Image (tube, rainbow, N blue to C red):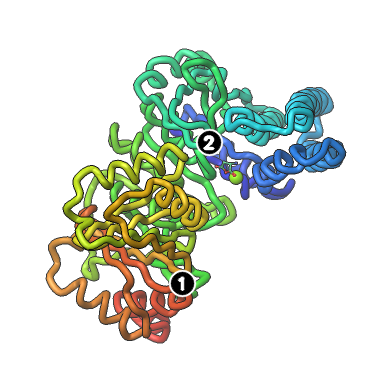
Amino acid sequence: MIVMKIGGSSLRSVESLRLAAGVIHGRPEPEKIVVLSAVSGVTNHLLRSVGEAMQSERRIGGLLDYLNLLHRELILGTISDSRIQHRVLDEVAYLISRLEKLLYGIAYTGECSRRMRDLIISMGERMAVQLLAGALQQQGLEAQALDADKIDIVASGEFGNGNAELDTTARMLPQHLHDLLRRGGIPVITGFFGRTPGGHTITFGRGGTDYSAAIIAHAMEAEELQIWKDVDGFLTANPEIVPEARPLDYLAYDEAAELSYFGAAILHPRTVEPLSRKGIPAVIRNTYRPDAPGTRIGAEKQQHQEIIKSVVTNSDIGMLRLHGASLGQQVGFLKTAVSALSDAEINIISVITAQTAVNLLLGKGDVERSARLVEGLHIAYVDQIEPVTDVALIGVVGEGLDTTRGLAARVFKAVAGAGANVEMIASGASRVTQYFIIKERDRDATVRAIHSEFFGSPAQAVRR
Ligand code: ASP
Ligand code: MG
């Protein structure tokens, strides 16, 4: 049995939908489960709709028309059997009418809880599974669209950032799928969300369908998780910054997790967790180039000669620097600051402490608000609170990084060569990664310098 995650970018046009359906149809495995994102752009549109509906009810009609037309065009373009076509059109019309009620609800009340927002933005996936299941039925397959919150994919935590309850889900999900699978049918399941123990829809954060697919692979004890995207997998660097970046054919779980956590926008950062529990391998494949091997991810650790496998960067981060002569000795201080931030649902990416300063690594958008919150705590021994937003994070990842002498020196020589100053370093927290903070304006030059230190300059790369 395999689980196939199909990303929204593979559903953006009639042509790409046909490709995706062909990839699913063409897989030889007897049991296949498909997990789906919303059609490309739809989740953003739904989030925007929430914002606009809060302002005024007048725009709701137009916002819904857009979704209606987008899905209608895809349905008419891929499903010619009129019975299937009508059924799918009806399902989508029903979902849009539910969405309409929700949007009017927030327009009239002028408020939208996180729980309500999760329900609203889950509609994209609900429409997508109807569409793709219809396209597969059109090809003569027994495909069935299923909503994750109705088949006991259970999650808890904060709305907008739920965490799967893996054991509960593993106990409950299989009974919903077994009969269909045994008949050779294909479950087409919504990604991105599950249900809370109390029955409310809860999402897993942006890009959460990868995580959904991993939860399902774990629950069903799949042999493999295939993640079908519009890229070839992980690369040695972001190709927009380093055009000569090369694809990686293999990563160990922790390497993939670190790369995802620190900003390679390939996988949802928590995807690896359910997989590694059961040793289920994943492979990232490109729908548009189905013959490319992609990147495999698994339990086995492999050390490359150059140690570093990839250099990642993330510009969405910032820092909150707290200064005070004796901060490092103040037990409990960190707890006070950290709980104030987590009460405000601010995610702390990392904490670096020294004797006279504590640096909190945060999402860029959270820095100012965090500064105000910590200010409000009036902690006696904090002399200065310094929000820093003009920075970017650079990370290098690779098995053997912690045990190879001279490696850090090579990294930082390259950084210095690019004219960048290191504002903060963190290493040792994870065995396979080292990351540091530089000024945002130095980002591209730094990434290029590290890449050419370890993977050769563009000229060398061409000669290979
Ligand atoms: N549709 C959701 C998003 O855009 C989930 C996903 O794509 O994985 O974030
Ligand atoms: Mg998406």
User: Label 1 neighbourhood size at 10 Å, few (<14), some (14-19), many (20+)?
Assistant: many
Q: Give, as a three-letter code, the residue at label 1.
A: Glu
Q: Residue at x 57, y 50 (%)?
A: 287
Residue placed most toward the observer, 29 or 205: 205
Q: Which mark is residue 160?
A: 2
Query: Ligand 2 shows up in which quadrant of the image?
Result: top right
Which residue is at 52% across, 46% downward? 228
**Position of 381 compared to 198: left or right?**
left
Quadrant (top left/top right/bottom left/bottom right) for the C terminus: bottom left
**Residue type at mark 2?**
Gly
Q: Which mark is residue 440?
A: 1
Gap between marks 2 and 1 measured at Cα: 28 Å
**Residue 282 in picture, x, y percent from top left:** 39, 43
The part of the image, by quadrant, that contains residue 89 is: top right
Image point 49% across, 52% down: which residue?
A: 366
**Picture layout, residue 190 above or below residue 436:** above
